[in-house]
């Protein structure tokens, strides 16, 4: 499997911003090519959105925060789109109910695509405005986040279809005869800088301000936890042993009858397969376990006699290792992959970027001195800093170049429809 390079994005010039804009907007359409018309309408749960809504919402962002605010006489494409495709920005209107997005059979897909074209044409003069560059970059990184959500939401919706749709057939087969037990990579404690430096280019506001953190000596598992290792947890009765679970996690397991990661299916013979964007596949024992909640990751760590890393331990290790190559959406595998055999012989961490978002033990909270942006755009991150956990590293459906050592993703501890995984710490 080809791995792609994730670079820390440097400040962009006007010409490169135009190229970046065109590439991101086109990539969203590229990801939609395997879909049939009906696929764009699906919404199997409140926490996922139809693909058509993602196409429109990412255009709504540019129309709302850039075109309407900076183009004299700009006329909205449609007077109701500001209501239909507002996600959660209460400061500028009343968003259409999230759980009803799947009811929007109209506007048609053709009209939404026309909306995107209208926005792209209107945005061209703004791409050379230096003062607007930070907000344009935010809009493009926002769209990259929705590219990932488009795929994970689609996977969740398709998982209810007995026909088991295939987004793309698997392109790679893996030999699993080079299995090696996980090992540890040690790191020295000290006072480190955490967070993003403005001189390093774009970052979301929740990645700063940069500040000092005290980290004690620690060690991280060399690679992500594999399906093989997680299956041992299941076979040892891990889901039936409350001593490994947080109270909220145990209540969740009991209430929702959780017995395995999301999308795992067990045959009458006891063998496991899993549903993926590559269709229903036999469980690759050496691939990273994915689609697990924070509760499951924490319980597995306790069962293993280990723990989850803090987000600052993760960030310190990612900077020191400088391991930015990974399995991103650009590799077009659309599934986490086993570590490369040649990489397993190295002394550094593997799979730290791409494959799976790694749950950390850190609650999603603001850094010291954090201030959300002024105005409605300040609702982007700050108001979600409660009751969620931080994840790091990106996944197999994250765009290459979108993540960096300071990047902070966040989800509620029970959520697992994203490509989430485990790296043990001690």
Image (tube, helix red, strand yellow):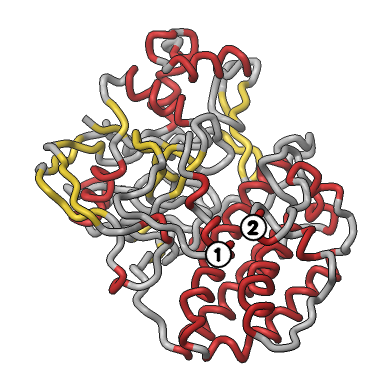
49 relative position to 402: left or right: right
How far is mark 1 from mark 2, CA to CA? 8 Å
Verify CB contact (< 8 Å) between mark 1 and mark 2: yes
Q: Quadrant of residue 5?
A: bottom left
**Residue at mark 2:** 91
Residue found at x 74% / y 57%: 53
Q: Quadrant of the N terminus?
A: bottom left
Residue found at x 34% / y 68%: 8
**Residue at mark 1:** 375
Front one among 331 and 397 = 397
Q: Position of residue 107 (x, y in %)?
A: 87, 63
Front one among 361 and 92 = 92
Neighbour tally class for label 2: few under 14, some 14-19, many 20 plus, Cα within 10 Å: few
Q: Position of residue 37 (x, y in %)?
A: 84, 58
Front one among 348 and 69 = 69
234 relative position to 167: left or right: left
Residue found at x 46% / y 75%: 134
Q: Position of residue 3 (x, y in %)?
A: 40, 61
Assign a secondary structure to mark 2.
helix
């Amino acid at each position: 499997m080809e791995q792609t390079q994730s670079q820390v994005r440097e400040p962009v010039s006007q010409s490169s911003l135009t190229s970046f804009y065109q590439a991101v907007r086109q990539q969203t359409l590229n990801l939609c090519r395997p879909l049939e018309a009906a696929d764009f309408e699906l919404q199997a749960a409140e926490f996922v959105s139809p693909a058509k809504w993602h196409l429109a919402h990412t255009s709504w962002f540019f129309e709302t925060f850039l075109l309407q605010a900076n183009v004299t006489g700009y006329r909205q494409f449609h007077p109701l789109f500001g209501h239909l495709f507002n996600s959660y920005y209460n400061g500028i209107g009343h968003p259409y109910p999230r759980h009803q997005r799947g009811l929007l059979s109209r506007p048609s897909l053709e009209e939404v695509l026309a909306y995107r074209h209208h926005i792209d044409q209107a945005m061209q003069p703004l791409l050379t405005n230096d003062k607007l560059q930070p907000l344009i970059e935010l809009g493009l990184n926002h769209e990259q986040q929705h590219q990932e959500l488009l795929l994970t939401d689609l996977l969740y919706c398709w998982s209810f279809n007995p026909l088991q749709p295939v987004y793309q057939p698997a392109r790679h087969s893996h030999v699993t005869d080079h299995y090696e037990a996980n090992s540890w990579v040690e790191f020295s404690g000290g006072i480190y800088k955490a967070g993003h430096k403005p001189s390093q280019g774009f970052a979301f506001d929740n990645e700063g301000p940069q500040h000092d953190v005290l980290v004690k000596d620690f060690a991280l598992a060399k690679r992500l936890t594999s399906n093989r290792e997680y299956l041992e947890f299941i076979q040892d009765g891990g889901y039936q042993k409350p001593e490994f679970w947080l109270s909220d996690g145990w209540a969740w397991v009991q209430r929702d009858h959780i017995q395995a990661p999301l999308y795992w299916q067990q045959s009458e013979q006891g063998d496991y397969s899993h549903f993926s964007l590559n269709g229903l596949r036999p469980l690759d024992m050496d691939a990273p376990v994915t689609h697990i909640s924070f509760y499951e990751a924490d319980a597995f760590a306790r069962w293993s006699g280990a723990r989850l890393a803090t987000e600052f331990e993760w960030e310190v290790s990612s900077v020191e290792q400088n391991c930015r190559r990974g399995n991103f959406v650009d590799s077009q595998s659309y599934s986490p992959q086993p570590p490369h055999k040649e990489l397993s012989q190295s002394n550094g961490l593997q799979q730290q970027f791409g494959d799976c978002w790694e749950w950390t033990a850190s609650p999603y909270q603001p850094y010291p001195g954090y201030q959300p942006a002024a105005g409605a755009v300040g609702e982007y991150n700050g108001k979600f800093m409660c009751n969620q956990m931080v994840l790091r590293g990106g996944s197999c459906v994250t765009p290459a170049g979108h993540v960096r050592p300071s990047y902070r993703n966040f989800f509620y501890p029970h959520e697992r429809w994203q490509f989430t995984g485990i790296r043990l710490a001690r």
